[in-house]
Amino acid sequence: MELRELTRVFAAERDWQQFHTPKNLAMALSVEVAELVEHFQWLRTGSSEELDERKREGIQHELADVLLYLVQLADATGVDLRAAALEKLRLNGEKYPAAVVKGDARKYDEY
């Protein structure tokens, strides 16, 4: 079963789909991203060497929450995430040609 279908079943079993409006899902996604960022707060660099097992597990769980809400939001808005991601990669490739921006972190309108 696909992740999208699994999230539908999970919500339906709990009668939660009534709460899963695009607005509520976007807000929940934002909260989960903030909870993910919290695991990196106050680390010197946030590199993997600074992450102990507890932090790694917390990051894993928050990433899963982010993914699940993202899948549900895409479902609620009729967005094909795979197609959208592929299109965005193509557009970003045009905006940031490797030959021009390699090793340069500036925004596309700064180079």
Image (cartoon, helix red, strand yellow):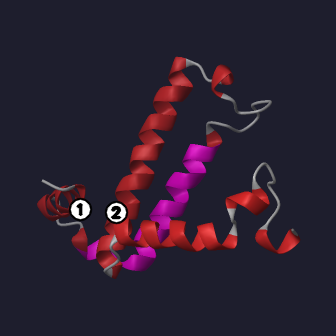
Residues at marks 1 and 2 touching, judged by CB atoms closer than 8 Å: yes
Q: Which mark is residue 4?
A: 1
24 and 4: which one is in front? 4
Residue name at image x 36 percent, y 65 percent: 82
Dot 2 falls on a residue whose secondary structure is helix
Residue count near mark 2 (Cα–Cα under 10 Å), binned few <14, some 14–19, many ≥20: many
How many numbered tags mark residues here? 2
Residue name at image x 75 percent, y 52 percent: 102
Q: Point out residue 92 in the picture as x, y percentages from the top left corner.
A: 61, 69
Give the residue furthest to the right. 110
Residue name at image x 50 percent, y 68 percent: 27
**Taken as a whole, is the magenta stretch helix, strand or loop?**
helix
Q: Point out residue 45 in the picture as x, y percentages from the top left corner.
A: 77, 32
> Taking 67 as reference, is 81 above or below it?
below
Left or right: 47, with 3 as reference point: right
Residue range in magenta is 18-37
Q: Which mark is residue 71?
A: 2
Left or right: 12, with 23 as reference point: left
Residue name at image x 82 percent, y 75 percent: 109
